[in-house]
């Protein structure tokens, strides 16, 4: 017999993503923590959506709080676990466009996560 805790995938944070998540408002941290817990259990949270343009399998959590939008990008399809690639506060008021520096960070950390997953498996 196995427990639910042993069935969960391991969670890895790339770069400063853990520290950035810790800087988010408490309500956002709580929601993202719950969502990542669901992802570890193999479920899809309601606030998760595919994020095209970075590579296959990248998903994004998004939450609004006090007029600001917070995001966390992750990939769940790797063998060794869930990789949180980047967490940031969206400052653009024009649609869903992501700032170029965040796109660069996401792409680099995805590459790093893929390499790390290969080393772990």
Image: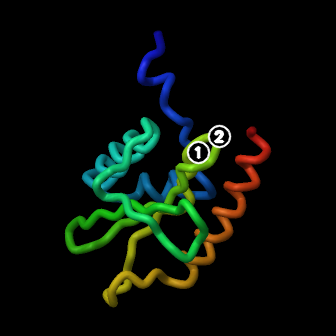
Name above or below for residue 11 compared with residue 87. Answer: above
Q: Position of residue 53 (x, y in %)?
A: 55, 76
Name above or below for residue 78 compared with residue 70. Answer: above
Q: Quadrant of residue 95?
A: bottom left
Label 2 with label 1: CB-CB less than 8 Å: yes
- Image color mode: rainbow
- Residue under the image location 50 percent in, 22 percent down: 6
Depth check, mark 2 against mark 1: the one in front is 2
Q: Position of residue 5 (x, y in %)?
A: 45, 24
Residue at image mark 1: 12
Characterize the local packing of mark 1: few (<14), some (14-19) or many (20 or more) Cα atoms within 10 angstroms.
Answer: some
Residue located farthest toward the left when viewing the structure as drawn: 66
Mark pair 2, 1: CA separation: 9 Å
- Residue under the image location 54 percent in, 60 percent down: 57
Q: Position of residue 54 (x, y in %)?
A: 58, 72
Is 116 in front, or is 55? 55
Under circle 1, the secondary element is strand
The quarter of the rendered structure image containing the C terminus is: top right
Q: Which mark is residue 61?
A: none
Q: Quadrant of residue 114?
A: bottom right
Left or right: residue 24 versus residue 73 is left
Residue located farthest toward the right when viewing the structure as drawn: 119
Residue at image mark 2: 80
Left or right: residue 112 versus residue 43 is right
Name above or below for residue 30 compared with residue 61. Answer: above
């Amino acid at each position: 017999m196995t427990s639910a805790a042993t069935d969960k995938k391991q969670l890895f944070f790339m770069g400063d993503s853990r520290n950035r998540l810790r800087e988010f408002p408490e309500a956002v941290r709580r929601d993202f923590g719950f969502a990542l817990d669901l992802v570890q259990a193999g479920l899809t949270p309601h606030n998760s959506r595919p994020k095209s343009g970075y590579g296959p399998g990248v998903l994004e959590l998004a939450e609004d709080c006090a007029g600001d939008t917070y995001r966390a990008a992750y990939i769940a399809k790797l063998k060794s676990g869930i990789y949180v690639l980047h967490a940031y506060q969206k400052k653009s008021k024009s649609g869903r466009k992501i700032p170029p520096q965040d796109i660069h960070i996401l792409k680099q950390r995805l590459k790093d996560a893929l390499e790390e997953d290969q080393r772990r498996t």
